[in-house]
Image (tube, helix red, strand yellow):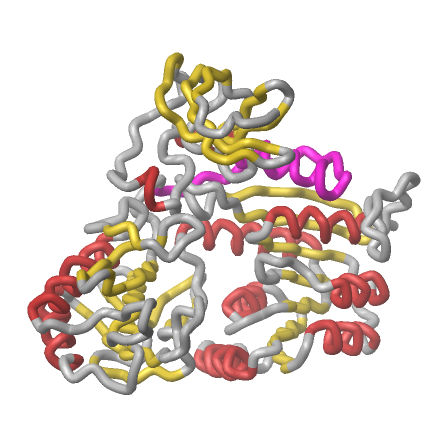
Amino acid sequence: MNNIKNTTQNLIINNLGINGEGIAKLDGITIFLPFALPNEEVEVKIIKEDKHFLKGELKSIITQSKFRVTAPCPVFEKCGGCQLQHLKYDEQLNFKTNLVKETFKKVGNIEFTPNNCTPSDNEYNYRNKISLPIRSVEGELKIGFFANNSHRIVEIESCPLQQNLTNKIIKVFKDFMIKHNIPAYDEENRKGLVKHLVAREFKDALLVAVVINGKEMKEANKLYEVLKQNFNKVTLYLNHNDKSNNVILGARSTLVGGDKFLVEELQGLSVKTGVVSFMQVNDGVRDSIYGDALKSIKSFNPQIVIDAYSGAGLLTAIIAKNVSAKVYGLEIISEAVDASNKMLKENNLEAKVQNILGDCSLTLPKLMSDIKNKTTLVLDPPRKGLDKAIINAILVSRPEQIIYIACGLTSLARDAAYLTNTKDILTDKTVEIVEPIYEIVSVTPYDMFPQTKHVETLVELRLKK
């Protein structure tokens, strides 16, 4: 198919792709079309022509899906942060349930029917944290989000996904920058002061970090006074990041005013959240995932629980508080282990948990070789999933139960295939005659991020007897 770019076509959308885009066919070639829905007849302009696929731009909807709704966000089609605001929420859940099933099948060669996707209590206003790039573009202040696959800022006044306080801070901070003529960062010449605004809220408290390209912001104390006038309880930090990369937060932060941490009550634990602390953005869904993981562990009744990738230790502490087993946390970042140990001590759990600092591929097999008791392994890796060294360590040590919490669906399906022996770990090829090592007990998707393509998934596996 040649010279089809920039032509206009009328097409029928067949289904949704993994990124929430509509998929159609033109003379056997797949066309990806953002913001189109299944069974819609649409007018499409072809904007990209590749050897194996086409990409289109939606020009008009000729026949509309019964599941289409009006997106509440004025920059929905420009921002790139959301992909599904135009789809009814029940259908978003169905899409994510089916996406998990199909990804397990296509990536992992695993035929398994997942539970229905667990909904979020809030379809909007669920995010407790916001991170906004702040830039000077041709001398003009821009605050918003980066458009998809670019560093072009789409300006916003508010975001419908955010909770109240993290939305309010946008206007307050922009007005302050304009009033005091504070220079924003310019990516072209790497000059200017303010690079990002990061804020997290819990109940009526707000923690704000202004990321700066330098050592100080002389108006910082004035900003803190303005924040106190606008928010009931607020903490302000300056975070220092003078590097030219895609990392938002630098390694050093300076407290300007307010309490050093937000103190949160989570699952019966007192938890301190700071500038660099990781915390799931959807409180209700996080509690559902951790609650269901805990329920599976308690029903299995292990003598040992190993929490790999334990981070600052929230899930480790939840498990220790609620089960009688000895708990181990494995984490490679020393600051995270220090934070976990402090939290354990503050919650009187230090006697029940032993944190081990080091690379999980080294610490896990050593720990497992010394353990002869009934063991549960909890895995909550980054989006890229498990390194093969970790998979090999698991297959050698063979803990009886695995609880795998995943934000990366494709990597989860791949890792599940290695563990269930539907895919060979050395060759990555499908295994013809499957002799299972582990068997899947349950797969449950969770809508941690409504209105987006993302899905969080909890899998329970048990060693095949």
Which residues are drawn in magenta? Answer: 96-122
Horizontal arrangement in the rendering, residue 198 relative to residue 247 (left or right): left
Residue drawn at (42%, 30%) of the image: 57
Q: Position of residue 342 (x, y in %)?
A: 47, 82
User: Which image quarter: residue 253?
Assistant: bottom left
Of the pair 324 and 244, the residue shown nearer to us: 244
In this view, 368 is above or below 48 = below
Residue 337 in sight here: yes
Q: How many marks?
A: 0
Horizontal arrangement in the rendering, residue 305 relative to residue 317 (left or right): right
Residue drawn at (84%, 43%) of the image: 430
Is-magenta flag for residue 117? yes
Q: Position of residue 38 (x, y in %)?
A: 49, 21
Quarter of the image where the N terminus is located: top right
Q: Position of residue 131 (x, y in %)?
A: 33, 61
Of the pair 373 and 254, the residue shown nearer to us: 254
Query: Which residue reaches farthest top?
Result: 63
Q: Position of residue 334 (x, y in %)?
A: 55, 83
Is-magenta flag for residue 25? no
Residue 91 in sight here: no
In this view, 314 is above or below 440 = below
In this view, 394 is above or below 79 = below
Query: Which residue reaches farthest bottom?
Result: 215
Residue drawn at (77%, 39%) of the image: 109
User: Which image quarter: residue 151?
Assistant: bottom left
